[in-house]
Image: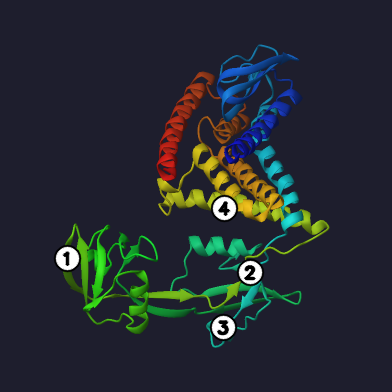
């Protein structure tokens, strides 16, 4: 069931994207030779009004094939290149635009039922730097470090991608009783001492991974080793480890670590590393509250804006190295994510299942719109680049050269999709 729902959502989003191309092609007198859902061999097809409508074997894509597309043919009536440059720009841009329209329409249903999460301060600890700066419970955060905030999840996203540094000044704009205020303060700094490892789970002392440059890794401990003792005290499990640290917090004093590897016991002495973290000094809301009237449409627009910004910021992290290949997901990963959301929603009832499925559709539709606007060959954004050059030069780029570039881009994207699909399957298994 979950796979069927995932495929329906994925296919519906792609179909709406291609519908944008289709409608604008018809509007500009361009002949659409085939409008299809899916890839590969045809399962069903019918011809009507000069267009073949097809359902294909693999429900992972779609296409709107136009007469003369990617060829040098311009004299043939109804061909893509025979249309005006601005007409062709509208046809190409219509796919991503329709994705944003779909995301907004679906957001209206989601926000209308579930509401939105205002970035409202829920608590300010007494004596914190935030309290000294004037922040109070109930204040609505509208800007954080120059980043505009519409929702609580906006603030969460920014802080996740841009962790607060201990030497950084916090700049906040907030609203109280309809009046906007600005404040700035140095964050609270908490100092801890760490060994530098992650456990397989809270119940075990098996080392899942080591933090680069931290003491345990520098001492020669490896992933898969099992910590068995600290300073002569036996540590049989995670609970014992937590209890030990509660009574004997780590400091800058050396500690003796005992660990097991392949049935053999080893000892090492190391000094925990000092680790300072900055705390902005308040908690904020991430829970949705109901809204009504025109506010539903307003926050639906903000929802689409949030999805677009999330995609753009994620792409930026990929380019700058903040995220890696393991953070990418293709069709297999998307279907798995939708399936996971479906399974987690089942306990909350049928209504919440469909709200969460619609939310996933909003995310995917906005994501597809942004990705297709990237200026890469074979994508809508790459085609728009060539059309923009044509509009400026008042003559087209060599059609055959453009076609070759788009074909090369398509091959690259297919290869990338296979790599991402492989990573998706490995992660799932």
- Of label 3 and label 4, which has the lower sequence position? 3
Q: In the drawing, does residue 233 fall left or right of residue 293?
A: left
- Of label 1 and label 4, which has the lower sequence position? 1
Circle nearer the viewer, 4 or 2: 2
Which residue is the extreme one toward the bottom? 127
Instruction: For mark 3, give the secondary structure.
Output: loop
Query: In the image shown, does 354 or 61 lie closer to the viewer?
Result: 354
Instruction: For mark 1, give the secondary structure.
Output: strand
- Of label 1 and label 3, which has the lower sequence position? 3
Query: In the image shown, does 273 or 145 lie closer to the viewer?
Result: 273
Q: Alpha-carbon neighbours of circle 3 within 10 Å: few (<14), some, or many (≥20)?
A: few
Q: Image quadrant of residue 49?
A: top right
Residue 56 in percent (x, y) is at 59, 22
Circle nearer the viewer, 3 or 4: 3
Q: In the drawing, does residue 26 fall left or right of residue 33?
A: right
- Which label sits on residue 310? 4
- Which label sits on residue 265? 1
Instruction: For mark 4, give the secondary structure.
Output: helix
Disc 4 to disc 2: CB gap under 8 Å: no
Instruction: For mark 2, give the secondary structure.
Output: loop
Q: Alpha-carbon neighbours of circle 2 within 10 Å: few (<14), some, or many (≥20)?
A: many
Residue 339 in percent (x, y) is at 56, 44
Q: In the drawing, does residue 300 fall left or right of residue 171?
A: right
Residue plotted at (53% across, 83% down): 129
- How far apart, in angstroms, are the residues tagged by discs 1 and 3? 45 Å
């Amino acid at each position: 069931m979950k796979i069927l729902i995932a495929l329906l959502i994925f296919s519906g989003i792609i179909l709406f994207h291609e519908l944008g191309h289709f409608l604008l092609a018809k509007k500009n007198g361009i002949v659409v030779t085939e409008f299809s859902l899916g890839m590969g061999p045809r399962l069903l097809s019918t011809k009507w009004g000069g267009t073949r409508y097809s359902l294909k074997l693999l429900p992972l894509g779609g296409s709107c094939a136009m007469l003369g597309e990617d060829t040098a043919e311009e004299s043939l009536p109804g061909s893509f290149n025979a249309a005006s440059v601005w007409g062709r720009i509208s046809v190409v841009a219509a796919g991503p635009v329709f994705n944003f329209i779909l995301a907004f329409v679906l957001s209206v249903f989601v926000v209308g039922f579930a509401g939105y999460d205002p970035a409202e301060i829920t608590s300010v600890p007494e004596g914190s730097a935030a309290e000294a700066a004037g922040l109070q419970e109930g204040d609505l955060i509208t800007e954080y470090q120059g980043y505009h905030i519409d929702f609580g999840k906006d603030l969460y996203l920014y802080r996740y991608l841009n962790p607060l540094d201990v030497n950084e000044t916090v700049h906040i704009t907030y609203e109280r009783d309809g009046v906007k205020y600005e404040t700035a303060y140095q964050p609270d700094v908490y100092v801890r001492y760490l060994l530098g490892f992650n456990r397989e789970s809270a119940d075990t002392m098996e080392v899942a991974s080591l933090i680069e440059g931290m003491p345990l890794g520098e001492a020669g401990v490896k992933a898969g080793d099992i910590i068995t003792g600290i300073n002569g005290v036996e540590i049989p499990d995670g609970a014992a480890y937590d209890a030990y640290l509660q009574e004997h917090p780590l400091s800058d004093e050396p500690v003796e670590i005992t660990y097991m590897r392949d049935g053999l016991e080893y000892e090492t002495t190391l000094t925990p590393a000092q680790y300072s973290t900055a705390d902005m000094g308040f908690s904020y809301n991430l829970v949705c509250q109901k809204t009504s009237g025109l506010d539903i449409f307003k926050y639906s627009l903000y929802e689409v804006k949030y999805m677009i910004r999330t995609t753009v910021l994620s792409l930026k992290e990929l380019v700058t190295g903040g995220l890696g290949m393991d953070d990418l997901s293709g069709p297999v990963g998307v279907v798995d994510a939708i399936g996971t959301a479906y399974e987690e929603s089942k306990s909350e009832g049928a209504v919440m299942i469909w709200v969460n499925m619609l939310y996933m559709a909003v995310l995917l539709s906005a994501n597809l719109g942004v990705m297709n606007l990237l200026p890469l060959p074979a994508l809508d954004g790459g085609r728009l680049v060539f059309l923009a050059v044509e509009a400026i030069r008042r003559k087209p780029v060599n059609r055959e050269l453009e076609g070759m570039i788009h074909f090369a881009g398509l091959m690259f994207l297919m290869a990338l999709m296979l790599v991402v699909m492989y990573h998706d399957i490995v992660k799932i298994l």
